[in-house]
Amino acid sequence: MQFIQNNWPLILVMILSGGMLLWPLVGRRFSKVGEVGALGATQLINRQNAVILDLREGKDYDGGHLPNAVHIPLSQLGSRGDELSKLTSRPLIAYCERGNRSRGASSALSKLGFAEVYTLRGGVRAWVEAGLPIAKNT
């Protein structure tokens, strides 16, 4: 007991840092947003006509994107989100270059009315590495 009283700040730091390490794992379990790999994404596209949303900026999108993707850069999602309103009955797969920005946008997409929101694990890079097709603007 004396040890705990003498070292309570260190014990508190240990508990807090452990909690911070575990939070991403716990948060995913309770999140309404799913994460799919390239195979899961193709299944959602083919079986449920999922909407594909590219959140990258224009030059990245022009360099190559998933076929039939809707392009709304993350920086414009707040002002252009209403463009997606007629598609809310379908599942939505959001992606960016590596998957980091799309996770951040997922809560905004849920607020737009999408019941099923997914992020593409690994982003467009994972899609390309899986050997799946890329469309380019000409």
Image (spheres, rainbow, N blue to C red):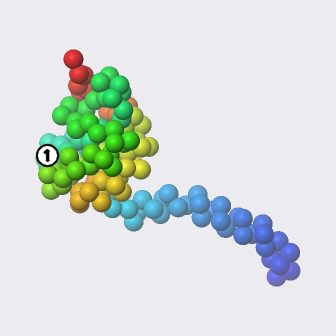
Crowd tier of the residue under label 1, counting other residues whose Cα lies within 10 Å: few below 14, some 14–19, many 20 or above: few
Mark 1 residue element: loop
Q: Residue at x 72, y 65 (%)?
A: 13
Q: Nearer the viewer, residue 54 or 6?
A: 54
**At label 1, which amino acid type do we have?**
Asn
| x then y, percent, for residue 72 | 29, 39
The correct choice, above or below, for 136 with respect to 69 in the image is: above
Residue furthest to the bottom in view is 1
Image location of residue 103, percent across then percent down: 40, 49
Q: Is residue 8 in view from this perspective?
A: yes
- Left or right position of 39 against 28: left
Q: Which residue is mark 1?
A: 49
Tell which residue pokes out farthest to the top in this image.
138
Q: Identify the image quadrant of the N terminus.
A: bottom right
Q: Report how many numbered discs are placed on residues in the image.
A: 1
Residue 59 is situated, as x and y percent measured from the top left of the image, at 35, 25
- Residue furthest toward the front? 79
Taking the spot 25% from the left edge, 32% from the top edge, the residue there is 66
Question: In percent of the image, x 36 and y 35: which residue is there?
Answer: 56
Residue drawn where x is 14% and y is 46% of the image:
49
- Rendered image quadrant of residue 3: bottom right
Horizontal side of 84 relative to 11 (left or right) equals left
Q: Is residue 37 among the parts visible in the rendering?
A: no
Foreground of the two, 72 or 90: 72
- The quadrant of the picture occupied by the C terminus is top left
The picture places residue 131, in percent across and down from the top left corner, at: 29, 27
Residue 126 in the image: above or below residue 136:
below
